[in-house]
Amino acid sequence: MPMLLEIDDAVFSDQGGDVRTVLTLLGYTVDQRHSWLPEPSTAEMACRYVETQAPGLIVGWREYLVNAATASAWQGTDQDPANQVSPPVAVTAANVAGLVADLGLPAVIIVENARNDGSLLKAVFAAYDRQLSAALEKHWLRIDHAGGGGDQPWLAGEAAKCFQHVCRVMVLKDNDERKPQQPITAAELAGRTSMEPMIHIWWRHEVENYLPDAVLQLATHEHADQLLSHLRSLPTEHQGWIDMKHGLAKSPAWIANALSPDGQRVWNAGYRKQLPRPLVPDDLALTVDDFRALGEEVHDELLHLVDKIKRVL
């Protein structure tokens, strides 16, 4: 589900502000750019508002508003907050103008390398949630290039300044310290301020550790087959911490100890610069099963990552 809105009845009154702004807000929900599950009475108020202010739109919009209210009734209002993707964004007569401006901007994901990290994200979206692929295609979501991890905090701060009421920015960081990560909890979500960028640290070392076999088979390294074979001989939790580009020289010592002597020889320098560029070619279609083959922990993380991105979408 895209970002969930909770629109106050007063938005559809004489105090609701500029008509164009309110219609733009409703247009976002009709286009499914953002989500709204109104109470039936609120949906009826919205219908009357559109009939009065823009009668030419009501024919196409009424069915959507009625269906949205029906979906709200099915969802119910007493759900456990821990099971919700994110708390709804409250839209009031006082903040509607600023929120509509925020909601009209593309959400931003800041990665270290937009070409390589971005290619993996696009493949993940295509495999796990086509809605995110569509958001990229419609420019509702963009992937920004940091040129390395050092500038990510500054870029995140600059991107956050573009938003007045709700920060729709995510930072996706390499796990340089190789520390185990956990899913964000309901308490952590509740404690996050609306103007704070969302952070996701990869549960594995870096983006190259998420490349399925179909990608690694495209590497131009002279020992590509052996590299892949020895890599997959390791337990999946070991595979996540090996340095794919630089090999054992920049990997924990216990990884080398888990490889055979031949594996140590082949993996001494890793793939170097002979992985595909971009990492996932545009014409290579990956599936959930391709990623799941890397380990259930990878599958679980990618599901979690998709949900986190939807919190800022």
Image (spheres, grey):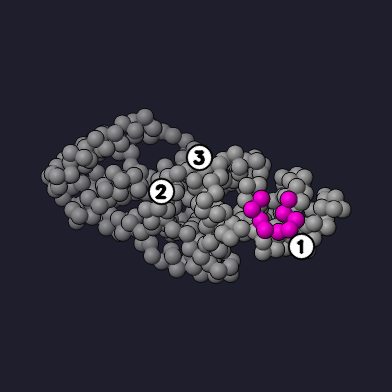
Main secondary structure found in the magenta portion = loop
Q: Position of residue 261 (x, y in %)?
A: 87, 53
First reached walking from the N terminus: tag 3 or tag 2: 3
Helix, strand or loop at label 3? It is helix
Q: Does residue 69 lie above or below 148 as drawn?
A: above
The numbered mark at residue 269 is 1
As drawn, is 128 to the left or to the right of 47?
Answer: right
Q: Which residue is mark 2?
A: 134
Give the CA separation, mark 1 to mark 3: 45 Å
| Residue type beneath disc 1 | Ala
Q: Amino acid at mark 2?
A: Ala
Camera-near label (3 vs 2) is 2
Left or right side of 97 for 188: right
Q: Nearer the viewer, mark 1 or mark 3?
A: 1
Indicate which disc, 1 or 3, sits on the residue closer to the N terminus.
Answer: 3
Neighbours of disc 3 within 10 Å: few (<14), some (14-19), many (20+): few
Where's residue 132, x and y in %?
44, 48
Q: Secondary structure at mark 2?
A: helix
Separation of marks 2 and 1 at Cα, in angstroms: 39 Å
User: Which mark, residue 82?
Assistant: 3
- Look at the picture and state if 125 lies above or below 80: below
Name which residue lies at 67% across and 58% down.
Answer: 220
- 43 vs 280: above or below: above
Q: Nearer the viewer, residue 118 or 20?
A: 118
